[in-house]
Image: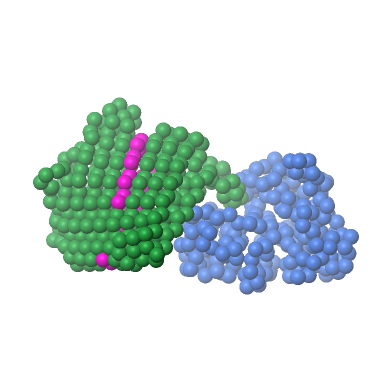
Chain colours: A blue, B green
Amino acid sequence: MLRLENISWNTPEGVGVLRNLNLTVPDGKLVVITGPNGGGKTTLAKIIAGIYRQDSGKIYLNDTDITDVDITERAKAGISFAFQQPVRFKGITVRKLIELAAGEQMPLSKVCDIMSKVGLCAEEYIDREVNSTLSGGEIKRIEIATVLARHSVLTVFDEPEAGIDLWSFTSLIKTFEDMRKNINGSIVIISHQERILKIADEIVVVANGSIQAQGKPEDMMKVLTENNAITGKCYKQEALF
Amino acid sequence: MNEITKDLLREISEWDGSFKGAYNIRENGQCAGRVSSKNIKIESKKDQPGLEIFIAPGTKDETVSIPACVTQGGVDDLVYNDFFVGENADVTIVAGCGIHTETGEPARHNGIHRFFLGKGSHVKYLEKHVGKGHGTGIRSIDPVTDAELEENAVLEMDTAQIGGVDKTIRTTNAKLGAGAKLYIRERILTEKEQTAQTEFHVEMNGKDSGVDLISRSVARDNSHQSYHSVIVGNAPCTGHSECDAIISENGKVDAAPELHARDNDAALIHEAAIGKIAGEQILKLRTLGMTEEEAETTIIDGFLT
């Protein structure tokens, strides 16, 4: 279980992005965080992974205080993070990156299992470098594969749908649906996508640096599409695309 | 053959107590062992220090190894090796040089290699350079490679120098006939006060010839590298060069690629990128559980692999 207490974060220029935010992600649950652009969603995800350091507040993972624990130690504690814009590595192959994520060398069959979950044929990709020859959709799916290869107690996906083509998106939804069925640990997804929102156990709306609403999808979808005061117009347009 | 030579041979070649195929071992300017095969003859030059290596036409899947080792300071070894590769031969040549010194005296190896590739031949050339020992003497390796590729010949060069060599000037010149292809993969890591200079000059003189030159380098500490490539297209041809360098600490890299199209159908491309390791790369690997230092090592090892 992840628990955030009174988390605040300001930009280096002093602009408040998160304000006394409180959030609990229970074990075995898929929580989707949504809300208008600029509302603080990605900042929140990066604070969970330790990439950003909150200005105030506390973070607990399974009742252990990880507030002052750095990125590396949070990863070792079982937090995984899938970047919205995955980085590329010249010279490092897809197989090597997945093995680095898993922390072990793998037989081809195991790499195949992981790659197939993101809709890629391992044999076509394992020897390719994670460089600019991969398309946006391919690199995104490989990023997700690196997260799936880990043994996580909490996995955070930052806008997994961003920069990915329609075909890849369909396969991505399938991946999340499978993860949802076989959930092992908690999952947090930052997303605007209606189809991702619908498979959540809980939807949390973050806007203006704090939680504006939260609840089950069947209750929240109506709120999201009707209540501009909570979600903002830009969100409404994105959520319905 | 002394123990230092044996250690160096293990690093720079596929020596495991013996070689597969023909070989010549050069130790401090002297021959420490030579074996020719039915198809590959190794002979001493008569007018200069060095070898003439004759690879018979049609030779297939054979390897010839010609490592050179300098195991003490005060040695300045100069050698001229010529390779005559017969038509349609398909072979692997393992060169490589190891320099070791425990004294303050400089140790240097300067290997001048000439390759004459006959029509339709294919050569895979592997060259690894290492510097070892605790001596303060300057370890220098200054290889010169001159290659002439006849019609449809293919030369694949894979060269690596990963630290340990204080000073190096690497020069590669090539002339390509019709349909000939040259592939170069160069990897260099310099550290401390080391310097490395690489010069490439490739002339594509025949129709449908092509060169693909990829150089990856890492300059750490106070080391300095310079890269200069000249690709000349005198015929309908394709040329591509790519120079990628990572700099860290006070490392410095100069890159000066030149492309010269002398034919309307010459298609030449150059790509170059120099910079420190991207912070996002470190972050990604840290989210996989690595420390910052482990992430840097992983990125550099991958880059130079």
Q: Which residues are magenta?
A: B151-173
Specify the principal SS of the magenta part: strand
**Which residue is more in the foreground, A212 or A102?**
A212
Rendered image quadrant of residue B255? top left
Residue B176 drawn above or below residue A76: below
**Which residue is more in the foreground, A77 or B204?**
B204
Q: In the image, is B193 to the left or to the right of A2?
A: left
Residue A26 drawn above or below residue A60: below
Q: Where does residue A11 sit, x and y in percent of width and height?
A: 75, 43
**Which residue is more in the foreground, A123 or B152?**
B152
Residue sitting at x 41%, y 54%: B259
Any magenta on residue A120? no
Q: In the image, is A102 to the left or to the right of B239?
A: right
Q: Is residue B62 visible?
A: no
Any magenta on residue B172? yes
Q: In the image, is B102 to the left or to the right of B21?
A: right
Q: Where does residue A158 sit, x and y in percent of width and height?
A: 69, 57
Residue sitting at x 39%, y 37%: B195
Q: Is residue B249 visible?
A: yes
Quarter that holds the C terminus of chain A: bottom right
Q: Where does residue A20 sit, x and y in percent of width and height?
A: 83, 46
Rendered image quadrant of residue A154? bottom right
Q: Where does residue B143 sit, x and y in percent of width and height?
A: 28, 44
Q: Count the numbered circles shown.
A: 0
Residue sitting at x 67%, y 47%: A51
Residue sitting at x 81%, y 56%: A206
Q: In the image, is A179 to the left or to the right of B23?
A: right
